[in-house]
Image: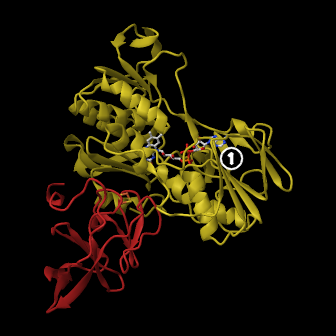
Chain colours: A red, B yellow
């Protein structure tokens, strides 16, 4: 379990990027739900935490594919693959992420281990 | 509607096919494409593909195993459209396709300089990109004619390959048509930082060379040596095939805000289409990826409802460009006289966000390496003016 931030530091409608390898984005929706997905878009090297959060979906800041934060599913190209989701836990007013054991769907040219210097 | 034919098998055509199926169209679907290829993506042609970081297979627009239950007629151009019920599309091989509905998605064709000197290129297709790359490989000097996005991206790639690069632009400032003169100049600085020579306000008189190009002659008498020349002077809509069809054509196929053309049962999408833009109060042909991918959903609804569907609000035009590793993003449409102000970052650092306003209303936004704030500002484009 990775501590992300105090709950109070992530207001509704906001997103946060944690510098794991690969990085993870945590979202707090307007409805008060918390979700975590890989921060890197599955199409190219864009940060989904920089994207536009609407309902349970985030729109990639570069080419506007939308990912469902609950399932990781992508709505329309250019991204074709779903983004990996992670579990979020809130304990003692702190947000934690339980990283997934599944392999990530990173875009071509982005590898784990190199993500930090991207 | 029992059958639909889509003419043009690229981004807009494929997106229309997807949208028709997603909206429940279960009839016969025919997709006609002049190129022999399955739909492929063009933006990488001036970026990763030209740089050798992407292969032809990476360009595929269709998903693995995607099946739209369509009949594909690839490698054959449409030559005419005849009104009637059904509508009838004639093809270059003498055959014809009949359908109750037609989607025009024939895109655009690169403008050329004329002449037949070797070493002179345009960039629109995967073949163009491969030929350009092969020529860049042995060359020392590239001259790009026209400071638009495609020319600028090719200049970037050529610099990384070690070529000496000059961009020649007839207008007083580069990128001025898309970005306005001030921001055009700011982006020009980025190229100069990377050793590209920019010559503005200079018209090209002629190309020189025997069989193969060796130079570019300017109206002011200057001569630029060149091993390779790229003409990045824009594209014209591929609409000649509609001559005599009754489909109204201006700068592209004239459409309403839902994609309907002047002919019932015919809609048009993508780079060939000039939709009415209510925010602008005029028809505007948009030549960017996102519009060609998204607007077909609106056009499909227009077609399937027989024009009864109320079109979705039109998203402002949006484009991106990758230059020297920086993300350039622009949304909206700027006209001469708009007020431009830098709201974040600064021009000197080449990382900034600029907002264009007309009568107090945000009409466009430009971001250079500012994806996060760009995403937020983009939403405000064309919102009603707020009292300030
Ligand atoms: C090199 C390059 C880089 C680009 N980079 C960017 C970018 O970074 N960002 C951005 O937003 N946009 C970019 N664009 C623009 C984007 O690619 C286009 O907006 C998009 O391709 C438009 O799709 P379309 O399907 O309307 O037209 P096109 O992609 O032009 O496809 C039209 C298709 O119709 C076919 N056709 C033409 N006439 C006929 C006929 N009579 N019968 C049958 N078929 C026909 C053509 O052969 C072609 O396959 C770039 C374009 C190019 C060329
Ligand atoms: S980088 Fe996310 S859609 Fe292209």
| Residue B67 occupies quadrant | bottom right
Classify B232 as above or below B346: above
* Quarter the C terminus of chain A occupies: bottom left
Indicate the position of residue B233 as horizontal and vertical percent values.
48, 29
- Residue B369 left/right relative to B235: left
Residue B331 visible (yes or no):
yes
In the rendered view, tell whether residue B31 sits above or below residue A85. above
Q: Who is closer to the viewer here, A7 or B265?
A: B265
Rendering quarter of residue B213: top left
Relative image position of residue B375 (x, y in whole percent): 35, 61
- The one nearer the camera, A38 or A29, is A38
Q: Position of residue B130 (x, y in %)?
A: 42, 33
Disc 1 is placed on an element classified as strand
Residue at 77% x, 65% y is B2
> Pointer 1: what residue?
B254
Label 1: chain letter: B
From the viewer's perspective, tell me whether residue B47 is left or right of residue A103.
right
Residue at the extreme front of the image, as rendered: B65
Q: What residue lies at 72% left-to-right and 38% top-to-bottom?
A: B241
Q: Residue furthest right?
A: B84
């Amino acid at each position: 379990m990775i501590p992300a931030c105090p709950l109070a530091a992530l207001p509704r409608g906001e997103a946060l990027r944690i510098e794991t390898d690969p990085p993870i984005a945590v979202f707090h929706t307007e409805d008060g739900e918390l979700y975590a997905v890989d921060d890197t878009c599955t199409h190219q090297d864009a940060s989904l935490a920089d994207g536009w959060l609407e309902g349970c979906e985030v729109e990639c800041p570069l080419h506007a594919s939308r990912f469902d934060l609950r399932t990781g599913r992508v709505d329309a190209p250019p991204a074709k693959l779903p983004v990996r989701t992670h579990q979020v836990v809130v304990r003692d007013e702190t947000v934690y992420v339980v990283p997934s054991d599944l392999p990530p769907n990173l875009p071509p040219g982005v590898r784990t281990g190199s993500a930090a210097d991207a | 509607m029992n059958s639909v034919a889509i003419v043009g098998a690229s981004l807009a055509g494929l997106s229309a096919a997807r949208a028709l199926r997603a909206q429940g169209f279960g009839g016969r679907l025919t997709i006609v494409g002049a190129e022999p290829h399955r739909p492929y993506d063009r933006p990488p042609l001036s970026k990763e593909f030209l740089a050798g970081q992407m292969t032809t297979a990476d360009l595929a627009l269709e998903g693995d195993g995607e099946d739209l239950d369509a009949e594909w007629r690839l490698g054959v151009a449409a030559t005419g459209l005849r009104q009637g019920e059904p509508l009838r599309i004639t093809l270059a091989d003498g055959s014809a396709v009949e359908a109750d509905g037609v989607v025009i998605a024939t895109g655009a064709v690169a403008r050329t300089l004329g002449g037949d000197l070797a070493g002179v290129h345009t960039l629109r297709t995967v073949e163009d990109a491969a030929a350009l790359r092969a020529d860049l490989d042995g060359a020392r000097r590239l001259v790009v004619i026209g400071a638009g996005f495609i020319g600028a991206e090719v200049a970037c790639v050529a610099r990384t390959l070690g070529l000496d690069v000059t961009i020649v632009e007839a207008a007083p400032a580069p990128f001025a048509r898309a970005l306005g003169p001030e921001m055009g100049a700011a982006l020009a600085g980025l190229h100069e930082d990377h050793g590209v020579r920019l010559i503005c306000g200079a018209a090209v008189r002629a190309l020189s060379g025997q069989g193969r190009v060796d130079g570019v002659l300017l109206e002011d008498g200057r001569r630029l040596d060149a091993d390779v020349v790229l003409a990045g002077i824009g594209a014209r809509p591929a609409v000649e095939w509609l001559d005599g069809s009754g489909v109204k054509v201006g700068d592209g196929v004239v459409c309403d805000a839902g994609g309907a053309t002047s002919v019932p049962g015919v809609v048009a999408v993508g780079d060939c289409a000039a939709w009415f833009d209510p925010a602008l109060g005029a028809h505007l042909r948009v030549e960017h990826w996102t519009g060609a991918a998204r607007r077909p959903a609106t056009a499909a609804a227009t077609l399937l409802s027989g024009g009864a569907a109320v079109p979705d609000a039109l998203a402002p035009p949006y484009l991106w460009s990758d230059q020297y590793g920086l993300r350039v993003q622009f949304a909206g449409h700027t006209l001469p006289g708009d007020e431009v102000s830098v709201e974040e970052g600064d021009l000197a650092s080449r990382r900034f966000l600029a907002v264009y306003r007309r009568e107090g209303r945000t009409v466009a936004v430009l971001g250079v390496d500012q994806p996060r704030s760009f995403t937020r500002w983009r939403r405000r484009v064309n919102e009603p003016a707020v009292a300030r």
